[in-house]
Image (spheres, rainbow, N blue to C red):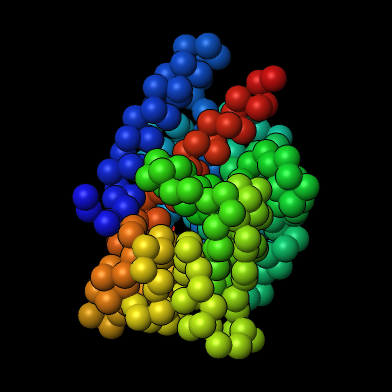
Amino acid sequence: MSKIIDGKALSLKQRDIIAGQVSEFINKYGRSPGLAVILVGDDPASRVYVKNKRIACEKAGIKSFDYHMDTDISQTEVVSLIDTLNAEDDVDGILVQLPLPDHLNTQEILLRIDPSKDADGFHPYNLGRLLMGSPTIVSATPYGIMLMLKEYNVSIDGKDAIIVGRSNIVGKPMAILLMMAHATVTICHTHTKDLGAKVKSADIVIAATGRPHIIKGEWIKDGAVVIDVGITRTETGSLVGDVEFDEAIKHASLITPVPGGVGPMTITMLLENTLKVANGRKQ
Ligand code: NDP
């Protein structure tokens, strides 16, 4: 059996299911679910992500409203656009592509999104619900990882899981989800002592740092499951993950590749979140 978790295949399967549910939504309510995406500036990676999201939305039958703003747009203008979208009936979900330029206050902007339209699950209300153990909208990347683990029959209950990275959008929500599934969770970051020893003791390793190959293959315990969230573009244009894949696969029972692992699942779960907020607004 292959040790590789095929995020691309799994996401295509999931997108078919979502497309079917979107059709049901359209039949029931006479319109498509709508996702507004706000992109500020010209960061090439962000442009690619936004384009991929639009294509995925269209394929699934979700209407995509794209707002591409100049880099020097003011805080007031972004906030005012969010207020407009919050009030717009055809817009079920709103997402702001991160990172934003430095002069903008990301926290204030994310807070301004109506939590019931927060397709990314980054609003403190939705993060708080997750923390309380009754999640509503869950950040797409950790949500997609949980689906991957389920689809590949990875047993989580009682296992030791390590997460390297503590961001609000990946590391922290991932920790809560794994804890809810009864793993014993360790979160590591730049101040962690002896990362290698901690990784070596883990049954499930989630790497989310954006530091290429920081997780050495020899650290992986025999039989561990390795999920590589990190994506870094090298000078030659190829994408690399946080994990030394070629060595790690010798020890892992299952491992995600980069690209073709977590990335496609993130977009898929964003589609699912959009449908979820759309259905939620109809209740
Ligand atoms: P952030 O930069 O917000 O967080 C990175 C985290 O990694 C921080 O907590 C940081 O620690 C930790 N870290 C950095 N260097 C080290 C180190 N040497 N040792 C231990 N910990 C370290 O990143 P994100 O969470 O937003 O994203 C992480 C990666 O995942 C990026 O490559 C990003 O592109 C990718 N990503 C991929 C997605 C996908 O769909 N595949 C979706 C989202 C992100 P500290 O807090 O101490 O600074």
Measured from the top left, where is residue 239 in percent x and y? 30, 70
Q: Is residue 72 visible?
A: no
Quadrant hosting residue 247: bottom left
Q: Residue at x 50, y 54 (%)?
A: 141
Return the residue nearer the eye: 202 or 167: 202
Return the residue nearer the eye: 230 or 84: 230
Q: Residue at x 34, y 65 (%)?
A: 252
Q: Is residue 86 above or below residue 50?
A: above
Say whether residue 246 is left or right of residue 38: left
Measured from the top left, where is residue 85 in percent x and y? 65, 40
Q: Is residue 136 visible?
A: yes
Return the residue nearer the eye: 42 or 210: 210
Q: Quadrant of the C terminus?
A: top right
Q: Residue at x 55, y 63 (%)?
A: 161
Measured from the top left, where is residue 159 in percent x and y? 55, 57
Quadrant hosting residue 190: bottom right
